[in-house]
Amino acid sequence: MSQLPMYDLLVLDFTRHRAGPVTSRLLADWGATIIKIEEPADLGDSMGGSREGFDYQNLHRNKQSLSLNLKTDDGQSIFKKLVSKADVVLENFRPEVKYRLGLDYDSLKSINERIICGSISGFGQTGPYCTRPAVDQIIQGMSGLMSVTGIPGSGPVRVGAAITDISAGMTLAQAVLMALYYREKTGLGQWVYTSLLESTISMLDFQVARWLANGDVPTQMGNDHPTLMPTGLFPTADGQVNIAAAEDSKFKLLCKILDIPELADFHEYSNITLRSLNRSSLLNKLKERIKYFKSAELIEKLNSVGIPCGPLYTIEEAMNDEQMNHLKMKCSINHPNLGQLSLVGQPFHSSLFCDMQTVRAAAPEHGEHTEVILKEWLNYQDDEIVELRNNGII
């Protein structure tokens, strides 16, 4: 294959912060042309963070930057011309802002009936909280995620990644792909939207489903699984390992390898339900044996008989692991100012595009592609571009 699968897709990206840029990054990595529309430099930098910082470079790779003042008539004219040619518009503004800028779906549809509008908000497009500001920290608390994270009795704990932003960005990318597929079949565009709150609830599916079905309110379980025992983190002679041996057959094998085969015959540990009910005594007995094994030894022994067991890594150790290197989760690009950069690779692979580089370009400078976009997409001439720049439109 000479082109990535989304090579002919044009996306106008008005998103900021993290959730929306995750969506556009996923599309950009697989070949879509992402035009990141930003205010002119003298009006501020809407992208947030240092443009040469690691986070900016990772979030905005493979994208183009167009400087455009949407608060002017000429800026609106350019915007509408681009909408007429675009496949997708992404935005994460508050409702009143998007309507003022003409970024609402009805306004976009009046220009291009086939347009797909993708939106991310904090709490949803409607409802009592729809106008509230939201960030990952707030949603982690309001979704219940923090209430099930941490050691029992220690109080709620924030998950150590911006999981609500990332999940919302990935959810919207799925919604956009669904809308593109439907448009291919019917010719119809549509508005697809999600929120940080909804996407996080969706990721809590086991815990939320448990409450919906049984009325059980999940609590903090530390490093142990809430129902499947033994599954958790165990100290060893030289560190810690994660073990998952909840199935009856795997539990028996674990006991055999730990040289306590009789433990599997105890009535209170004879099935998954009883092992969960008697988890405290079971874990104490297992820890007393596991603490004498070295981590590497136990990992090898358990995996060799089909019991999942793995090390406890730092980020550095994880990224230097031989399997991670094999999966190419580190990729390199060249930046004109920073030189060679290492970024996070794509998390899925394609048999058709396995030899193609999905991370192809560093994040853009402010307005870096303005002239190219105006010329190639809208046929603007040099003198017209100079006039637009002099008038503060670009």
Image (spheres, helix red, strand yellow):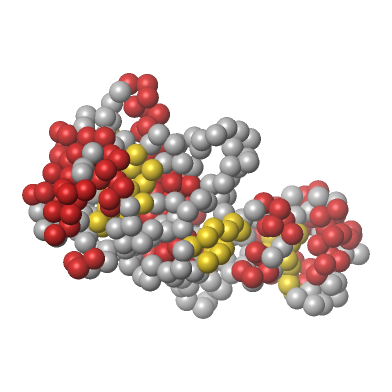
Left or right: where 149 falls relative to 271: left
Q: Is residue 214 visible?
A: no
Q: Tell me if residue 182 comes above or below residue 394 in the rendering.
A: above
Taking depth in this image into account, of 376 and 331 the one nearest to the observer is: 376
Left or right: where 89 falls relative to 228: left
Percent position of residue 95, x then y: 18, 52
Residue at 27% across, 63% down = 46
Q: Is residue 362 visible?
A: yes
Residue at 73% across, 72% down = 240
Of the 4 image quadrants, the one containing the C terminus is bottom left
Direction right: furthest residue: 259
Direction left: furthest residue: 73
The image quadrant of residue 147 is bottom left
Q: Tell me if residue 165 comes above or below residue 28 in the rendering.
A: below
Left or right: where 383 falls relative to 361: left
Taking depth in this image into account, of 242 and 264 the one nearest to the observer is: 242
Percent position of residue 308, x then y: 75, 55
Q: Give the total of numbered labels.
A: 0
Direction front: furthest residue: 383
Of the 4 image quadrants, the one containing the N terminus is top right
Residue at 30% across, 40% down = 376
Percent position of residue 220, x then y: 53, 67
Taking depth in this image into account, of 351 and 40 the one nearest to the observer is: 40
Taking depth in this image into account, of 246 and 29 the one nearest to the observer is: 29
Residue at 58% across, 42% down = 356
Percent position of residue 345, x then y: 57, 54
Q: Tell me if residue 157 comes above or below residue 119 in the rendering.
A: below
The image quadrant of residue 182 is top left
